[in-house]
Amino acid sequence: MSKKRNVFSEEIELSEIVLEKTNQAFEMIQQEGIIHMEKTNTRGKRRYKMQAAAIAGICLFAVSSISVFAAIHHYWGRGMNGNIQASDAQQQALTEQNIAKVYQEEPDRSSLAVTVNGITIKPDTVVVDERFAYMSFHISGYHVEDGMEPGFDRVNVYQGDNPEDENAWVNMTGTMYNGIIPDENGRAVYEDGTPIQSYEDGSTICHYTDSNGDMEYIIQASVVDKNDSLLGKTMHVDFQNLGTLSKAAFTLGVEGNWDFAITLPDVSSSQTITVGQKVGETGFTLDTIDISPISMKANYSVEEAPEEHEDDLGIPEVMGVILKDGTRLPYLTDGGSIGYTDSSRKNACHMAGYDRVIDVDEVAALIVMTSHENEKVEIPISK
């Protein structure tokens, strides 16, 4: 049974701007008493006379409606767009579906911020499915010189309440957002699409701060166990000491600990699709794929496990997708894990996050890289 929500029965708190406009409307009504309005169209003129009370209701409804619609426009923020790119429509859809959460919209947002030694850090946006969690944190009060890379001495990320428990472990990568994103072909560009520039010494010019001088730290976390799920879990993120990084060496700027416990969204966005196709000339068959707007898990059966070459297990990797309109995203996947799922090496899986949000219903085929030969194979999928 679907749930219907009566939004008109809830109290709406009007902003100062909306209240000011409403008060101005009432002042105008009080001065005029009765308002005459003209409506003009191609068929001639009509004159309407309306009582002040009716006008007041219309003014209040119009202004309040503007406030409500403005309040529900979700913006993921600069850092999250660097973590996983999404169009405005995708941001609205995933947030409305409770797959993403924007903490700036929360009533208790001020209580979520942690301030230590003049540096304030607060959660900004979270986007989650069963396998991956993308998180961004807003940082204000800290500044570094041009050419310096800001960073933390240590960042701990774990699920549950006991960081020593093996079930708490997650795969994690994190960095201070530098204003650089990959384009559709995997090339690095600035967030406005312009080419990357360099200093005289050849190092890349990064844009760590926004127009207010604030920064964002971005995290991609994923499950260790392929059967685990992050949905609805409590994710702890603990930042320790803020400073600068140079050749992996940390220089302390501000000492402190900023610790957060975040309850992740619990809505599933993943679909399981039966594929049942052999991957090129390999001994792997892609049986099924679990795919969501932000990650995928490819499940293989194996005729005979190939010989390993150093860290290369020989397992095919999904690199990208082809959309129904012909658009190719050959470098979609970004980070994840790959391995055999049993001791007999007759089954394997590849889990990968994306660098951008996709519409699962628009995916027509997968672009799969076979190991060793570096051959790309296109595998159609049907839903």
Image: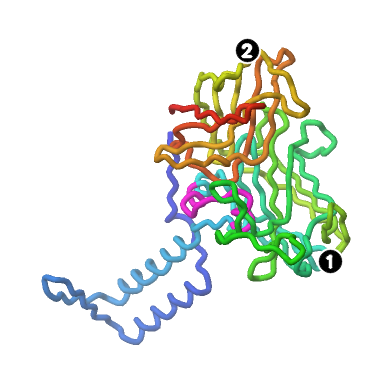
Q: Does the magenta stretch include residue 91?
A: yes
Front residue (pair 116, 255): 255
Name the residue: 77% across, 31% down.
167
User: Measured along the vertical axis of the image, is residue 132 above or below residue 253?
Assistant: above
Single out the residue that lies furthest toward the left.
Answer: 43
**Three-letter amino acid code at the position of disc 1:** Asn
Task: Tell me the residue at 56%/38% (across/down).
Answer: 267
Left or right of residue 217: residue 297: left
What residue is disc 1 on?
A: 117
Where residue 4 sits, quadrant-wise, is top left
- Of the pair 29 and 193, the residue shown nearer to us: 193
Q: Can residue 297 be seen in this view?
A: no
- For the rendered model, the colour scheme is rainbow
Magenta highlight: main SS = helix
Measure the alpha-carbon separation of dots 2 and 1. 59 Å
Residue 124 shows in this picture? yes
Q: What stretch is highlighted in magenta?
A: 77-93
Answer with mark 2 or mark 1, whichever residue precedes in sequence. Answer: 1
Give the position of the C terminus as an image quadrant. top left
Query: Where residue 275 sits in the image (x, y, percent)?
Result: 50, 22
Q: Residues within 10 Å of mark 2 (few under 14, many from 20)?
A: few
The label on residue 303 is: 2
